[in-house]
Image: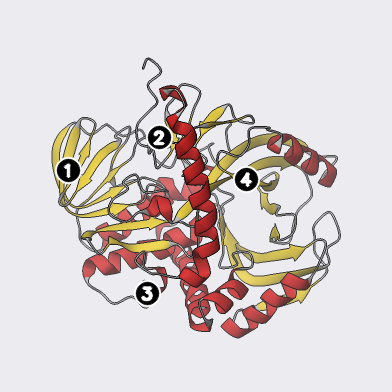
Amino acid sequence: MSTLWQDVELKKRDRLYGKTKADCTVIGAGMAGLMTAFELEKRGFSVVVLEAGRTASGATAKTTAKITAQHGLIYDKLTSKHGLSSAKLYFESNTQGIDKYERLIREMNIDCDFKRMPAYIYGKNSAYEIRKEAQAADKIGAMYKYTSRTSLPFEVKGALRFENQAQFHPLRFVKAICENLQIYENTPVIDIEDGKVTTMQGEVQTHYIVNTTHYPIINLPGLYFLRQHQERSYCVGVKTEKRLDGMYLGIDEVKSFRNYEEGIIIGGEKHRTGNNSEGGCLCRLRDFANKCYPKGELVSEWSNQDAMTHDGVPFIGRFSVFAPRMFVATGFNKWGMSLSSVASDLIADLICGKKNEYEKLYTPNRVKLRASFSSFAVDAGYSVKGLAEGLLSSKEKRCTHLGCRLKENKDEGTLECPCHGSQFDRDGRVVFSPANKDIRRDE
C-alpha cells in the first residue's frame, strides 16, 4: 500500500561492506534517527546511520505527519498520574519540537508544505473527557479554545482547539536534512555491543550508539519488549474540494483528519498488532470516508504501526544504566513527528554532557508503577499466551524475536506477533521490529 508521501524519490545509498569508524552510530533512518544524526553532525560529531531497508521507508513514510503538542487526552492523564510539573514539561518540549521544525525549514529553505494550523480533539458522543482535557490545558498554560463548532462533516458534542500547531510533507523534509548524512541502506544490524555495531556484511567501531529503530531490536539490557506494545492503524486519502480548518482527532470514535494537497487524509481503525485475524479494518475505514465525503475519490490507502508505552510517555535517553554510551528513542505513542524533534535535542545534549530539563521526564530508566501496572499486566498476558502457542507451532509460524506464535493480518496479508508487534511480509521478510531476522521458509 503506497502512501501520499511517497511521491518523493530519495537517493539510494550503498550497503555497508567491511569496517568503518564514527563518533556516533545511529541505528534506524526514520525521522527520529535522521533528526538526531543531523543534530549530532551540527554539533561536530562524525555520524554513521544504519538502515535495514530504505531511508524513511518505515513509520515515517506512513505517518499522518501532524506536528503537534496535542496528543489526545494526554494532559489530563499526565496531570493525574505523573503530576502537573510533568504535564507542563511534556507540553513545553513538544511545543519546542514544533518550533525546531519551523526553524530548520526556514533556515534551509525546505519546500515541504509546512503550515501552522490548529489541532482539535473532539467528542462525537460526549464532551465530558474533552472538558476534562480543557481543564488540564488551562493548568499547563496552553493556548486553547473550547468549542462545539468545527469544520468536520458531522456534528460533535465538544472540541478542544490548540492554536499554532503544524502539519507538513515528511519525506520532502527528510530529503533535505539527510542530503549530506552518511547513511548505509539495506544494512540490517545483527549485534550491538559497547563500542561496536555489527551488520550483515560489516561493522562500525563507534563511541556512542543511538537506537531509533521504532522498537529496540535487542532485549538486554533495557527489557523494552516488556515495557510497551505495538498497535496498527489505517489511513485513506480522499480527493475532495472540501477543506478543514485544522487537524482533528476523535476521542470516542478515534478517527484522525487532516488536509493534504488535493483532499483529506482520514485515519483510524486501530488494533493491537496481531489482533486482526478477521480483517475488515480497511473496509470499515473506506465506508466511513465515503459517508463523510460521498463525492470524494479514494486515491490512496496504507497502514502504520506505533509503539505504545505503558505510562503514555516515550522512552528517550540512555538505553540502560548498564549501557551508559547507548541511547534510545522509542514508544512515541502515535506522535512520532513532534517527539522525533524532542529526541534529537535530548539525545544530543546527553552525548554532549549538557543539561536538558526534559531528561527526567523521558528517561527510559524511570519506574512508574501506578501509571503503568494495568497495561503491563495486559501485555504480560499476551506474551505468556503467545509464547505458549509458539512452542506448539511450526518454525515458519514463530516470530524470530522470542518465538511467539504469529497471527495473520487479513487486511494486509502479513504475519504479526501479538506479543511484541513484529511484522513479516508474505515472503517472511521483517517489516517492523523488534524481530531483526527474516522467517526461513525452508526450515
Residue 105 visible in this rendered orientation of the protein = no
Residue kind at label 2, given as amino acid type: Gly
Residue 385 falls left or right of residue 271: left
Q: Earlier in the sequence, mark 2 or mark 3?
A: 3
Picture layout, residue 229 above or below residue 250: above
Residue 319 falls left or right of residue 368: left
The label nearer to you, 2 versus 1, is: 2
* Mark sitting on residue 17: none
Residue at image mark 2: 403
Q: CB atoms at circles 2 and 1 under 8 Å apart? A: no
Check disc 4: other Cα within 10 Å, few if <14, some if 14-19, many if 20+.
some
The label nearer to you, 2 versus 3, is: 2
Q: Position of residue 380 (x, y in %)?
A: 48, 51
Residue kind at label 3, given as amino acid type: Lys
Task: Say which residue appears at 66% left-offset and 65% top-offset.
Answer: 119
Query: What's the distance in space between the residues labelled 2 and 4, CA to CA?
Result: 21 Å
**Residue ranking furthest to the top:** 442
Where the N terminus falls, by quadrant?
Answer: top right
Residue kind at label 1, given as amino acid type: Val
Residue at image mark 3: 360
Residue at image mark 4: 271
Q: Earlier in the sequence, mark 1 or mark 3?
A: 1
Residue at image mark 1: 204
The image quadrant of residue 254 is bottom right
Query: What's the distance in space between the residues labelled 2 and 1, CA to CA?
Result: 29 Å
Q: CB atoms at circles 2 and 3 under 8 Å apart? A: no
Residue kind at label 4, given as amino acid type: His
Q: Position of residue 271 (x, y in %)?
A: 62, 45
Q: Earlier in the sequence, mark 2 or mark 1?
A: 1
Q: Secondary structure at mark 4?
A: strand
